[in-house]
Image: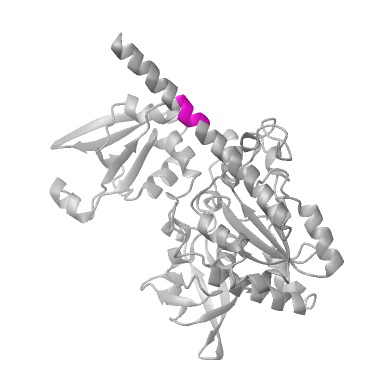
Amino acid sequence: MTRTILLGLWVLLATANLADAQKNREEKVRDDRKKVEQEGFWIYNDLAAGFAEAHKTGKPLLVVLRCIPCEECVKLDDDLVDRDPRVRPLLEKFVCVRVVSTNGLDLSLFQYDYDQSFAAFLLNADGTIYGRFGTRSHRTSWADDVSIDGLAQALRGALVLHAEYPKNRGALAGKHGPKPEFSTPETYPTLRGKYGPKLDYAGKVVPSCIHCHQIGEAQRQVYLARRQPLPEKLLFPYPHPKAIGLILDPKEKASVRRIEEGTPAARAGFREGDKIVSLEGQPLLSLADVQWVLHNAAEEASLTAQVQRDGKPVSLTLTLPKGWRRRDTISWRVSSWALRRMVAGGMVLEELTNEARKKAGLSEAEMALHVRYLGQSGPHAAAKQAGFQQGDILVSFDGKSDLTRETDLLAYTVNAHKPGEKVAVIVRRGDERIELMLPMQE
């Protein structure tokens, strides 16, 4: 009887906490709207009004896309919205639009890394893109990718491009991507009928919102539903420059902080201190602009870079070899949770440290993926139901022992196996080697 009462109290408490969390998310979105509209500086969630104002005033546009419930980028966003003194004078030269959902978003224009919850576009009133801002390479940390100083540099650069427009229209053409198969997020098959083109402020706002990462997931599901392999561009979207050995300064537009030896960037001849002025003819305003060019590069490509080195112009050729995208990582991405469900049965895997390898009797060269987390319910509990345990070390997967990162395992398996199939996995559990069969899922 006591156990039943305690269980009932636990369920009530969990339900209350969930309700409070949902209420808090609702309050965040509504409070954000109230605050921004009262201040009157930003146009709130109305792109049409923003473009109309830009046409009227002749100013360039700054469009910031920001998922309100997301906490990871709140510091950067608070600084921006609260008019940090480094950017306030610059913002006044733009028509500023704040977009808090992707419902109804024109995907032929607003193409960016959809695994982000903060992204900015700098545009002309006719839709010409001057540049993008906003980069991410970690689930919670932004310090190595973006900064308020970097945003200020991007704004200044956009103002220069705006003053030169339309003479520079040709150089800016590449900043537009190809026309997508689906024009807005809510028209994708997996989102159609679940969401509308606008947020539901008359009802519950949060459940009506299409988050950025849902677009990326919807794009992949189109291929999976057709039983087509996922293209590298969808598996490894918007490669981070560090994946090719190019470490950029987040406080500048595109300045080289460091070059990793033996990488495409090193072989191209980039040097510390280089200021990359353009890549493939496109002027660069931020690290995100570099990613845009890399995202649209072929699987084997040669890209032309113009840099300023000690005040002098230098031309470089960046050669991207076959498989270059796979140097990047996708484990930090929110959309990777769907891949973990499909091919890892809900496991979250991490590379074993060298110290832990020694303790387990494994060499540094061996595959050793530690089960850091094991899903407990629904499709994410498939690995648990198959006998996997938290703390297991995967040393072989589908007969392969070269999948040394979680990223490698996810990218390989999603195209190598179909739902319903089972994959043989060997794990180390203490001193034992155990073979388990992991089911693949939709």
Q: Is residue 436 left or right of residue 266?
A: left
Q: Is residue 322 magenta?
A: no
Please, which residue is most extreme toward the right here?
56
Q: Is residue 170 visible?
A: yes
Nearer the observer, 29 or 405: 29
Quadrant of res 243: bottom left
Q: Is residue 16 magenta?
A: yes
State the extent of the magenta-drawn residues as a range.
Answer: 15-19
From the top left corner, tell me how far across and down residue 47 is, in percent: 76, 53
From the top left corner, tell me how far across and down residue 132 is, in percent: 63, 64
Q: Is residue 392 left or right of residue 158?
A: left
**Vertical placement of residue 421 versus 261, above or below:** above
Nearer the observer, 141 or 105: 141
Give the image's coloring scheme. Answer: one colour
Quadrant of res 218: top right
Total residue callouts: 0
Nearer the observer, 144 or 317: 144
Query: What secondary structure do most residues of the magenta stretch adopt?
Result: helix
From the top left corner, tell me how far across and down residue 35 is, in percent: 66, 52
Q: Quarter of the image for the N terminus: give it.
A: top left
Residue shown at the point (56%, 40%) measured from the top left? 25
**Vertical placement of residue 272 versus 174, above or below:** below
From the top left corner, tell me how far across and down residue 205 is, in percent: 65, 37
**Vertical placement of residue 192 versus 121, above or below:** above
Q: Is residue 298 visible?
A: no
Residue shown at the point (23%, 55%) measured from the top left? 365
Q: Is residue 235 left or right of residue 385?
A: right
**Vertical placement of residue 2 versus 150, above or below:** above
Nearer the observer, 353 or 204: 204
Please, which residue is most extreme toward the top here?
1
